Amino acid sequence: MSANVSPTGSQPTSTYDSAFLKACRREPVPHTPVWFMRQAGRSLPEYRKVREGIGMLDSCMRPDLVTEITLQPVRRHQVDAAIYFSDIVVPLKAIGIDLDIKPGVGPVVEQPVRTRADLDRLRDLTPEDVPYVTEAIGMLTRELGSTPLIGFAGAPFTLASYLVEGGPSRTYENAKAMMYGDPELWADLLDRLAEITSAFLKVQIEAGASAVQLFDSWAGALAPADYRRSVLPASAKVFGAVAGYDVPRIHFGVGTGELLGLMGEAGADVVGVDWRVPLDEAVRRVGPGKALQGNLDPTVLFAGREAVESKAQEVLDSAAGLEGHVFNLGHGVMPSTDPDALTRLVEYVHTASAR
């Protein structure tokens, strides 16, 4: 057990009163907490330097490198939370799926999952499959002290999309063909992925993560009825599996304005919102009892300091009536973003929202 984990196995004791976790629990905060999806990554020169000549998946399996990369944006930007550096396909690689992350393309699966026989390749994930995760999180929680660490995983639908398509897709034609044409196989696939995802999140929480985020990056490709019938049960299973740990659970997808209520229904404590829906409208769609996270358009960061601060203030104003709000972008930091723009944004949000 990490020295930073409470005896009950719930939340790291030194992070419990952090602004980030308070906001997730919808408690009063001294300022609106800030972190950024993909804050550890290609926008940072120090990241590019330590990753030179090292493949993405190899980087995710080296505890020393994971620790350094995860800490970089915390040191530079003074964000209110770190997010564990990894990739959503890491648990699939760990159970033996033949895949690689190809530069400029993304995850590519050598043999796509298309038949019932293919499900046999998706075995259970155990902590012994990912010892580097436990080791890295132990190192991180000692370094981070009172700064919370967010663990994460890909949601069953998004993982299924990669597995069935064989890689990234704009149309999800093979995944949707299975969902509509063989709903039993589809349901079994997502249920299997829910088990794997749940196990991966449990490893992170038990190692010391203070919160977890489930990325359903591609759920915005679905109509609400299809999401409710064919995706919601698997996502709900993941959130239910980690409910007993008493750590905040965040749910995020891109282009999911029509799904916000359903994503909250899946069991999240915090619902992430992209930039397409104002937060005061998002809270109406999500309903009471949930904090919200978001939702500055990542491209605003290219517009200059005055514009960034103006748009950030719009987000803060839109969030003024929320029970809990975590400031974030509406998607990940873009690779060519000026790191100084992120540092200034954190400072602005902290100052402008100080209670």
Image (cartoon, rainbow, N blue to C red):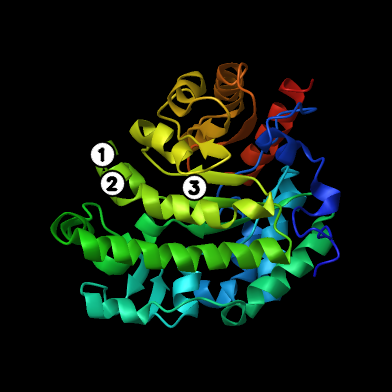
> Residue at the spot x=78%, y=69% of the render?
139
Mark 2 and mark 1 in contact? Answer it, CB < 8 Å.
yes
Q: Residue at x 58, y 62 (%)?
A: 201
Q: For residue 225, which numbered disc appears in the image?
A: 1
Specify whether 308 is left or right of 158: right
Marks 2/1: CA distance? 6 Å
Indicate the position of residue 25 as horizontal and vertical percent values.
69, 36
Give the mark, 1 or 3, whose residue is nearer the N terminus: 1
Task: Quadrant for the N terminus, please.
Answer: bottom right
Q: Whole-percent x and y of residue 339? A: 63, 46
Q: Nearer the viewer, mark 1 or mark 3?
A: 1
Q: Where does residue 234 sit, x and y in percent of width and height?
A: 40, 55
Which residue occupies 34% across, 32% down? 258
Measuring from the top left, give residue 328's x and y in whole percent: 58, 37
- Secondary structure of the residue carrying tag 2 is helix
Instruction: Please give left or right for residue 256 compared with residue 26 in the image.
Output: left
Residue annotated with mark 2: 229
Disc 3 residue type (three-letter): Met
Residue labelled with disc 3: 334
Asked whether residue 57 is in view, the answer is yes
